[in-house]
Image: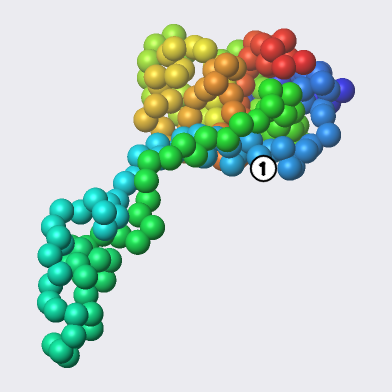
């Protein structure tokens, strides 16, 4: 099992923690990680784009000029795609971009992302992460003590969540909202021992 250092909110090492290999020590499956990211980005798309084809734009019922003898190219409608105000060729229509992925694949992708953070020493574990009051400066001091900038903080502490809202390049997540995209997007994952235990309980 992998061992990681445990720090306090002052950034001092206060011990070590043994991580469960079933969650933080799996074989990294890059293919599933890629699929999970593509799935999340695709599922976030609204798919509401719409443009009109030549059959949907108004007007164009009369032939603009006779077929022959004018010197112009023949035209049947002023709403053909080559005309200003005409319809669009192969116009986009509303569609569902969502992709499906098996539950076991999704769980393995998440475990692979967490394992990659452990292997790269980008997983920071605190003995406890909580603030007595909502104060952005206090949360920023904690991050400065840990020497992390672009971080995803896993916590359920409401004061921590609100305090981190205005800090650039920092996001908060709970164990239930963990996802592969955000784990990979932020260079460091910060969580306390309680969150580690919760993750191991849910995903082991």
The N terminus lies in quadrant: top right
Quadrant hosting residue 85: bottom left
Nearer to me, 63 or 78: 63
Q: Residue drawn at (55%, 21%), measured in percent from left and top?
A: 177
| Residue on which disc 1 sits | 34
Count the numbered circles shown. 1
Q: Residue drawn at (46%, 24%), measured in percent from left and top?
A: 139
Q: Residue drawn at (49%, 12%), measured in percent from left and top?
A: 157
Nearer to me, 6 or 175: 175
On the image, the x and y values in percent for residue 199 come to: 68, 16
42 lies above or below 24: below
Q: Residue drawn at (12%, 65%), measured in percent from left and top?
A: 62
The C terminus lies in quadrant: top right
Q: Please indicate, yes or no, whether residue 94 appears anywhere in the rendered image.
A: yes
On the image, the x and y values in percent for residue 36 come to: 63, 36
Judge left or right: residue 90 versus residue 27: left
Judge left or right: residue 163 versus residue 97: left
């Amino acid at each position: 099992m992998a061992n990681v250092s445990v720090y306090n909110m002052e950034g001092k090492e206060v011990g070590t923690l043994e991580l469960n290999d079933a969650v933080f020590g799996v074989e990294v499956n890059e293919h599933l990680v890629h699929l999970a990211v593509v799935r999340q980005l695709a599922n976030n798309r609204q798919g509401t784009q719409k443009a009109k084809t030549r059959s949907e734009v108004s007007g164009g019922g009369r032939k603009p000029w006779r077929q022959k003898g004018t010197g112009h190219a023949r035209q049947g409608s002023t709403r053909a795609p080559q005309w200003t105000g005409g319809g669009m060729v192969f116009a986009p229509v509303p569609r569902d971009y969502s992709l499906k992925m098996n539950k076991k694949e999704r769980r393995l992708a998440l475990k692979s992302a967490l394992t990659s953070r452990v292997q790269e020493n980008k997983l920071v574990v605190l003995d406890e992460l909580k603030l007595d009051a909502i104060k952005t400066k206090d949360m920023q001091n904690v991050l400065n003590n840990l020497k992390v900038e672009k971080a995803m903080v896993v916590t359920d502490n409401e004061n921590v969540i609100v305090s981190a809202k205005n800090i650039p390049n920092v996001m908060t997540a709970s164990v239930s909202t963990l996802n592969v995209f955000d784990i990979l997007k932020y260079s460091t994952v910060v969580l306390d021992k309680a969150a580690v235990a919760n993750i191991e309980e849910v995903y082991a």
